[in-house]
Image (cartoon, coloured by chain):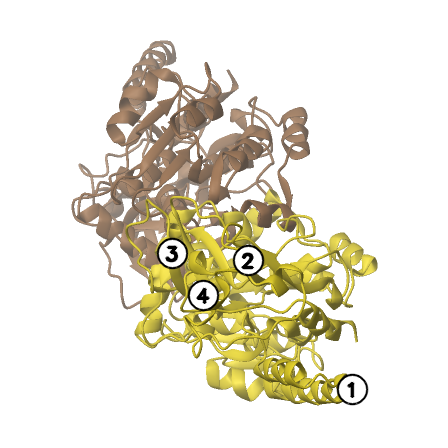
Chain colours: A brown, B yellow
Amino acid sequence: MSGEEAPVQQQQEPTEEKTENPPTEEPPSEAAQEGEPSPAEEPVDEPAAATPDKAPVAPEEEVFTYRALFLTGYGGYDKVKLQMKKGKPSLKSAEVLVRVKACGLNFAELLGRQGLYELLPSPPVTPGMECSGVIEALGEEVTDRKVGDRVLVLSRHGLWQEVVGVPASHTFIMPESMSFEEAAALPVNYLTAYIMLFEMANIRAGQSILIHMAAGGVGIAATQLCQTLEDVTVFGTASASKHETIGQGGVTHPIDYRTRDYAEEIRKISPKGLDVVLDPLGGSDTHKAFSLLKPMGTLIVFGAANCVTGQKKNLLAVAKTWYNQFTINTLRLMHANKAVCGFHLGYLSDEEELITQTMTTLLELYTQGKIKPRIDSTYHFEQVGDAMRRMHERNNIGKVILLPEPKKEDKKEEEKAESNPEPAETEDKKEEEKAENKMETSTEEVKGEEN
Amino acid sequence: MSGEEAPVQQQQEPTEEKTENPPTEEPPSEAAQEGEPSPAEEPVDEPAAATPDKAPVAPEEEVFTYRALFLTGYGGYDKVKLQMKKGKPSLKSAEVLVRVKACGLNFAELLGRQGLYELLPSPPVTPGMECSGVIEALGEEVTDRKVGDRVLVLSRHGLWQEVVGVPASHTFIMPESMSFEEAAALPVNYLTAYIMLFEMANIRAGQSILIHMAAGGVGIAATQLCQTLEDVTVFGTASASKHETIGQGGVTHPIDYRTRDYAEEIRKISPKGLDVVLDPLGGSDTHKAFSLLKPMGTLIVFGAANCVTGQKKNLLAVAKTWYNQFTINTLRLMHANKAVCGFHLGYLSDEEELITQTMTTLLELYTQGKIKPRIDSTYHFEQVGDAMRRMHERNNIGKVILLPEPKKEDKKEEEKAESNPEPAETEDKKEEEKAENKMETSTEEVKGEEN
């Protein structure tokens, strides 16, 4: 499968990783400069050793390199490649340099790879809207962050890389108890869910809601946020194998949309309809959503997942979703006493006050134990194709996370290969490890539809 | 003018009025039965005298009569006629009989007269969605109301009559300090404004709003309700002569839409746009409204006043408003992060819990002095054409009220006419009084556009 070609890229372009060393002190590696494999280093075990050894090599033209994922064109999983970037990210006066520890994978990146996400610049481009990490350097004007701060970061794109310069205002201090994976899982899904529920729909105690893809990142976030209110009835669609998990998470009525008509199921239980429907699907499902609303109900459309079928752009699916797109006139809205909203976090990026306020609220809720991102699985950068496939095939329950650091097995392998360059054995071993690693990171065996 | 024909109807079909007497004890008047003029009686001065005098006339076929307005067909002001209804309104077990003291006039009734309000049954029908009065009798099952309770009443139609039977659940006890005129002015305008602002738009402190027809009933209600929040910036359209009044009422930026482009004026002051727009106009103004919203803003369409131009239905205006009707697809909504809602109180009449809760809140706000309906003018039933013209020509600031009780001047006139039946003199006098009365009730000389 094409998605498995990504790790090959990693083998051609391995990396160095020095969590403890600020990048300014990072000397260039000749091998890395030329895109050749170089021995990976354990960031914790060998924090300072490399610096004195390598510093003399090219002191006057220091070249900093780091691992970054690139979308190289539109198409299948193989279009996202791991490459080395050269040169320290430039740091503006209001920016901070972050050593990235974990990144979130979002549906937007699946769309982007297919050429269906208009906010992502044309390839080649580094995707990535959220990450967590540690601040390594500060721009001159930054006074409210310090080196060593653990932060989560939100951006339009560009975060899928080992180090990144971002405006300090786009970083948020992580609570002490939060892991890097949780921090990378939080921004997009929880901001989306929170703003839709509490800013747009104004959901209140005692109301009812339909959450599609209830085992996906936004679905789980929305379900958890509904639990912060008394007595909200949550209808959640997911494949049957995920019902136990989402039920424990707060979904009152899990519905297997694959075997039943979810609208019929909902009407059986709630004949008057629903107060809120969150619709990430688009197309004909939006029509169903509108009809399921009770008077004074609110529909929020925040995606067009129905556009995405195969690995590559499916013009028929796009056309069908577009053709079935919900269009409404104000007379019909008046007679129904309903609200239709559109939500797209990407187009809200200028609303810094709203984002900052909401993020502050979310981090408080996390600290209070009221929300907790559910990590479905973690993949190293070189496994990005597998990560995307997992989300694309809706096998995840919760968030799929990408880790910038190289797979340890691979790194050990590379070390071994250096000391004993026997390619055949190495390759076999690697294949084994890849298989193992896949099982490690993809612990959920259920099949479903969530993102 | 056609509207002035209504009083003639009154002269042909006068009434008796006995506020203090329950209708069950009301004996028939032969004159009233035949539709002939009979001396009008002062309800307070002669409460019980009529009963013993007239009881012997037709004890076995008691006929109760009362004044009621009827829409007799679609068209101009003359289509609403004052007539006598015969027979005591039947009272179901959950209903109460209300002696009506004041009725509200709404834009819906102007539309209804033109055949443009689909919730009003076909003529002949008695309009009237709100009134105030005193409970005169209780259905068997009614336990939470008592005879003598001062109540305000909400209904789909049918309240423009002297006595009316309504479900007890559609009545609300008036605060002691509230006048009947205020009580008749409150339900439709304040429910509309409150539900739009706080249930749909979820307006909050520090936000901004555009209120069209800010000197109209809903406009004044919405402006007052915005004052219950801190620091809401209210843009309000009205003709220049009304600016002082609406400014005192809480409109931060009054805009004369007749001499300026209101959208341009708003953008000068608030370049980022508005959080909320209330749109009672429809057509091309809805497009302007949408474009005036800032991200996360909410547009609520709750009327199509642009349909109404002349006294009779203007097919061109209707077609133009219809043609320009705002239609939106979900993709555009998503990219804009905006909400579009429709509101129509008439289609919410089944939502008794919402209506009851909101009315309770509104009566509390009244008692706290936070809202106070502004009465523009009062007209007797026989002057309904003048009342409609005042609203239609947007000359009102606040609410136009209809009173079931006959004009006192006319009653005196009739008494005089009976004792000294000299038609010529009487007619002259009546014409004078009509003119006087018109000036009395239409004290505002300004010209504007509000309802």
Lower position in the chain sequence, tag 4 or tag 3: 4
Nearer mark to the viewer, of 4 and 3: 4
Both labels 2 and 4 in a single chain:
yes
Between the residue at mark 4 and the residue at mark 3, the CA separation in whole angstroms equals 18 Å
Chain letter for mark 4: B
Using the image, tell me which numbered label, if any, was put on residue B300: 2
Observer-side mark, 1 or 2, equals 1
Packing grade of label 2 (10 A; few <14, some 14-19, many >=20) is many
Q: Quadrant of the N terminus of chain B?
A: bottom right
Same chain, marks 4 and 3?
yes
Q: Label 3 sits on what residue type?
A: Ala
Q: Nearer the viewer, mark 3 or mark 2?
A: 3
Q: Mark 4 sits on what residue?
A: B51
Gap between marks 2 and 4, in whole Å? Answer: 53 Å
First of labels 1, 3 by sequence position: 3
Q: What amino acid does circle 4 point to?
A: Thr
Q: Which mark is residue B424?
A: 1
Query: CA gap, disc 1 to disc 2?
Result: 55 Å
Q: Earlier in the sequence, mark 1 or mark 2?
A: 2
CA separation in Å, label 1 and label 3: 43 Å
Q: Residue under circle 3?
A: B137
Q: Amino acid at mark 1?
A: Ala
Q: What is the spatial separation of the Cα atoms under label 4 and label 1, in whole angstroms?
A: 33 Å
